[in-house]
Amino acid sequence: MTTIASHQGILYVVATPIGNLGDMVPRAVETLQTVALIAAEDTRHSSRLLSHFDIKTPCIAYHDHSDEQRTTQLVGRLLAGESIALISDAGTPLVSDPGYRLVRSARQAGVQVVPIPGACAMIAALSAAGLPSDRFAFEGFLPAKQVARCTQLESLAGDSRTLIFYEAPHRILETLQDMAQVFGPEREVVMARELTKTFETIKGDKVGELAQWVASDTNQQRGEIVLLVHGAPKPENEAMTPEQMRVMRILLEELPVKQAAALGAKLTGLKKNFLYDWALQQGE
């Protein structure tokens, strides 16, 4: 294990508000005021936040397109004894935001990394959605192209966990329509839009109905959006013989789950959806 030298700086991963500036925690303000440098996803975007809290700490841009030289430069300053705060445009850094490379490089160099918790859009949405929250999966942004998006949705169709996605406003209607096609129009979906902001909206419905509602109101196609999808219903207790299980395990060794379930249904006579869900449970 790498020993952290006392003279090294600390990398603080600081969550910032997702809309309402009143959600900024005091520890985050104090940290941003006292570090030597703030690495921000967009320095211009963060200037309003920093000005509001009278934070005059120098800023440097650090985002998805920053090259390895910038990462090395920041780690070098940490090793030299300067503490740095990492912030994104909103919410918790690294949750569909930049920062992974810097945090990983800092830890590999033996630098202490300290999280300063605060706002996170997906957790805020989950807390108010009324969907099962004991098990959930964060999938981030779906692919922009429809074919790739539907392929990814199909791979998640049998997942019994609550699924959480971020989506851009100009794609929200297409995504809901694709979800209705892949998951079925009866699947429950909650759309959380503009959380903590003036036009905050949290709307849950069958995905087919929700798509129609969004299509009829262009105001719902604006702002930051979190989509939460109720997990697939767990399969009914359907008896599998040892031989049927053996066949499925052999197929799963050679094929993706979806293909194994389709071929297994032909070989065993069991329903494809049941076999798909059974196969997913084997991997848990």
Image (cartoon, rainbow, N blue to C red):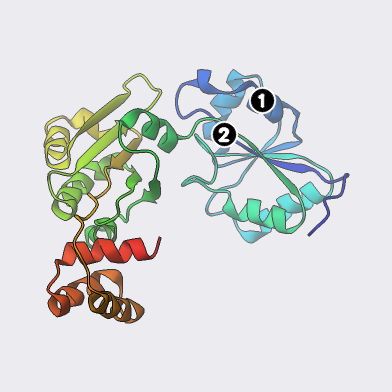
Q: Hey, which quadrant is residue 270 in on the image?
A: bottom left
Determine whether label 2 and label 1 are within 8 Å by CB: no
- Callout 2: helix, strand or loop? loop
Q: From where the camera sits, is residue 172 visible?
A: yes
Residue at screen point 73% across, 52% down: 75
Residue 281: image x %, image y %? Answer: 34, 61
Position of 249 with respect to 72 (left or right) is: left
Q: Which mark is residue 104?
A: none
C-alpha span from label 2 to label 1 = 10 Å
Residue at screen point 33% across, 47% down: 163
Q: Residues within 10 Å of mark 2 (few under 14, many from 20)?
A: many
Residue 208: image x %, image y %? Answer: 12, 42
Q: Tell me the residue that label 1 is attached to.
A: 27
Position of 273 with respect to 129 (left or right) is: left
**Amino acid type for the residue under numbered disc 2:** Ala
Q: Residues within 10 Å of mark 1 (few under 14, many from 20)?
A: few
Please report whichever mark, 2 or 1, sits nearer to the chain's N-terminal start. 2
Residue at screen point 21% across, 55% down: 235
Image quarter where the N terminus lies is: bottom right
Q: From where the camera sits, is residue 193 visible?
A: no
- Front-most of residues 149 and 135: 135
- Front-most of residues 239 and 256: 239
